[in-house]
Image: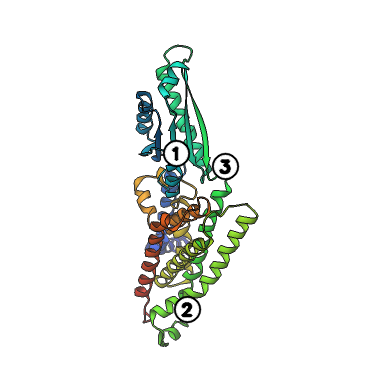
Amino acid sequence: MKRFIGFVTKEFYHIFRDKRSMFILFGMPIAQIMLFGFAITNEIKNVNVAILDKSKDTETQKIINKINASKYFNIEQEITSEAQIESIFKKGKVKAVLVFEKEFIKNLQTQKQAKIQVITDATDPNIANTITNYVNAILQNYLQEINQTDKPTYQIQTQTRLYYNPELKSVFTFVPGVMTIILMLVSAMMTSISITREKELGTMEVLLVSPLKPFQVIIGKVFPYIFLSIINATVILLLGFFVFKMPIEGSLFLLAFESILFIISALSLGILISTISNSQQTAMMISLMGLMLPVIILSGFIFPISSLPLPLQIISNIIPAKWFIIILKAIMLKGATFDIIWKETLILLGMTVFFIVLSIKKYKIRIE
């Protein structure tokens, strides 16, 4: 037993001295519970909405103030005509528009009934449904305040209108999200083991003594995988279009360009992981464990980013998948053009350049 206890003690020492093992044992569970704890929720918070107030009376202003005072909505802007609704939806600034009918207070006082139209961006069906339910709850609370008698006197009817996804098909969210996750994880994983494979097989010396410069090695490693990832993206789009009836309202050329840009970004990130890893096992662990959770949780695929705590919202900005999902939904569902998604495109381009430059700098020309 003394020998056995000595052996177990030795194993404990090995584990405690290995920083990577300690990180896997304690760091990853803490990170996962924190991410899932804050992200997994059916609630929405701080959703930007726009107001089209055709009546502009005291009662509509009270309702607007009540909506703005809630933790669920932020009044992003007030518009003056229905022609502006589609343009602000395409820009992705707001998720819903509340339209108050003309002579709202007159109808409420004379007919004991008034109408509010709730127009939602239904590219994410769950969020659209939740927004409608929350608006109805706020209106019911407002009616309870003005109806002091036992029998309610006044009523407000809500009319719902859904943009881009009138049938509330969940596949409209599923296809862009899954396409992003597959391209991000598979592309990064494939390239993350490319240079580490050379190190483990002992062929790294051949690359180092070759006349190829570091940037040529990096680009050469990425180039073949671009075509393989393009095939992946094409298959996903074809399945989405023909099997799941996913619409493609925008330009196919623009969609192809943005997809290739994202693929190069993901592959460049994989190369960066490969240059800083000493083994394929380490590279695989970083590419899977280090990318899977952020891509799923912080990209806006499953959980709305506006509902996350502010620190996680800030961190989500460095996740390439977030920007690509915005681009995919804008092109495929909203028919957006480049002048609408130029900002997201520049961010992806900047990330790609950053990953490639950092990979070249991290590429070691000597074996340690």
The answer to which image quadrant residue 165 occupies is top right
Query: Image point 60% across, 55% down: which residue?
Result: 240
> Residue under circle 3?
168
Packing grade of label 3 (10 A; few <14, some 14-19, many >=20) is some
Q: Earlier in the sequence, mark 3 or mark 2?
A: 3
Q: Amino acid at mark 1?
A: Glu
Q: How is the image coloured?
A: rainbow
Pointer 3 and pointer 1: residues touching (CB < 8 Å)?
A: no
Q: How many marks?
A: 3
Which residue lies most toward the right here? 243
> Residue under circle 2?
198
Q: Quadrant of the C terminus?
A: bottom left
Question: Is 243 left, or right, of 337 in this rendering?
Answer: right
Residue 107: give x, y in percent of width and height. 45, 20
Q: Amino acid at mark 2?
A: Glu
Query: Image point 47% across, 11% down: which residue?
Result: 150
Packing grade of label 2 (10 A; few <14, some 14-19, many >=20) is some
Q: Which mark is residue 222?
A: none
* 333 to 139, vertically: above or below: below
Judged from the image, the secondary structure of the residue bearing numbered disc 2 is helix
Packing grade of label 1 (10 A; few <14, some 14-19, many >=20) is few
Is residue 157 visible to the viewer in this orientation of the structure? yes
Residue 104: give x, y in percent of width and height. 42, 24
Is residue 72 visible to the viewer in this orientation of the structure? no
The answer to which image quadrant residue 110 occupies is top left
Give the distance between the C-alpha atoms of the residues marked 2 and 1, in whole angstroms: 60 Å
Q: Which mark is residue 82?
A: 1
Judged from the image, the secondary structure of the residue bearing numbered disc 1 is loop
Judged from the image, the secondary structure of the residue bearing numbered disc 3 is loop
Please tell me whether mark 2 or mark 1 is closer to you in this view: 1
